[in-house]
Image (spheres, rainbow, N blue to C red):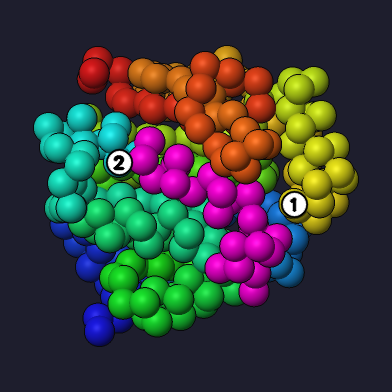
Amino acid sequence: MEPSHTPPGGPGTGRPWASPGEATARSGSGSVDHAEIAKFTAMADAWWDPAGKFKPLHRLNPVRVRFIRDRLAAQHGRNPEEPEPLRGLSILDIGCGGGLLAEPLARLGAEVTGIDAAERNIAIARRHAETVGVKVTYLPCSAEDLAVQGAKFDAVLAMEIVEHVADLDAFFKAAAGMLKPGGTMVVATLNRTVKSFAFAIVGAEYVLRWLPRGTHDWRRFMRPSELARQLRAHGLEIKELAGVSYDPIGDSFAISRDCGVNYMSVARHAGHR
């Protein structure tokens, strides 16, 4: 079994990265909200429990994986139905948590690097990847920590993370700076609407109790127009916007036209399709 944490020498950089400890010590991590890190560290042991505190992400994960797989396959002329349609593509998962998204993308052939500012999350992600025999590079650092080392990727993922970020400008500057020319950024977050307050806060945290109360702050949710402005400021344009809707009867999520609660976007450098 290959180890799941193999720095230095990450994919697509052309040079070695610092060790996790060096990266953390070097931090200029203006985007890291330490209160949010503490919140998710306290729940870290539940990452791989499909009925636990991260149950919504387990339900959402198949939709996220298919969305990313299909868009990256189309961008690089691959057949998404092949066993490993992402083979050879380098992907960065920012705020990877316990590795729920990083592992299935690695199984699709991608060279995945997962980063998280919560060291407890990284420890759990590494242990799980080693247990199941999936190769992922996990680093305990922020996006800024990695960006200053010159790391470059075919795709950068910011999935359910921007609503927990302290400095959005610093975050998107670092994330956009790690895209190769023509690379793809996928962002998934929550819209700031009355509907999202009803469903994501009242429903998910108080009625259904999917998440501990206080997991999300509705005021930090991002409207698609706000996300577009942030991305444009760093040379990226949204090429696709898709809603994610929950079906209570089937207890499942699906891509939809309704961006009123959850949505995902695909962005690339200006001038690239």
Q: Nearer the viewer, residue 243 or 11?
A: 243
Q: Quadrant of residue 17?
A: bottom left
The residue shown at (55%, 37%) is 253
Q: Position of residue 77 (x, y in %)?
A: 12, 32
Q: Position of residue 260 (x, y in %)?
A: 65, 20
Q: Which residue is mark 1?
A: 210
The residue shown at (25%, 81%) is 2
Horizontal relation, residue 12 to residue 143: left or right: left
Q: Position of residue 112 (x, y in %)?
A: 31, 58
Q: Which residues are magenta?
A: 44-67
Q: Residues within 10 Å of mark 1 (few under 14, many from 20)?
A: some
The residue shown at (27%, 60%) is 107
Q: For mark 2, give the secondary structure.
A: helix
Q: For mark 1, give the secondary structure.
A: loop
Q: Nearer the viewer, residue 22 or 10?
A: 10
Q: Is residue 240 above or below residue 248?
A: above
Magenta stretch: includes residue 190: no
Q: Which residue is mark 2?
A: 69
Q: Quadrant of the C terminus?
A: top left
The type of residue carrying mark 2 is: Arg
Q: Position of residue 119 (x, y in %)?
A: 57, 72
Q: Is residue 273 above or below residue 43?
A: above
The residue shown at (28%, 35%) is 70
By secondary structure, the bulk of the magenta-drawn segment is best described as helix
Horizontal relation, residue 135 to residue 83: left or right: right
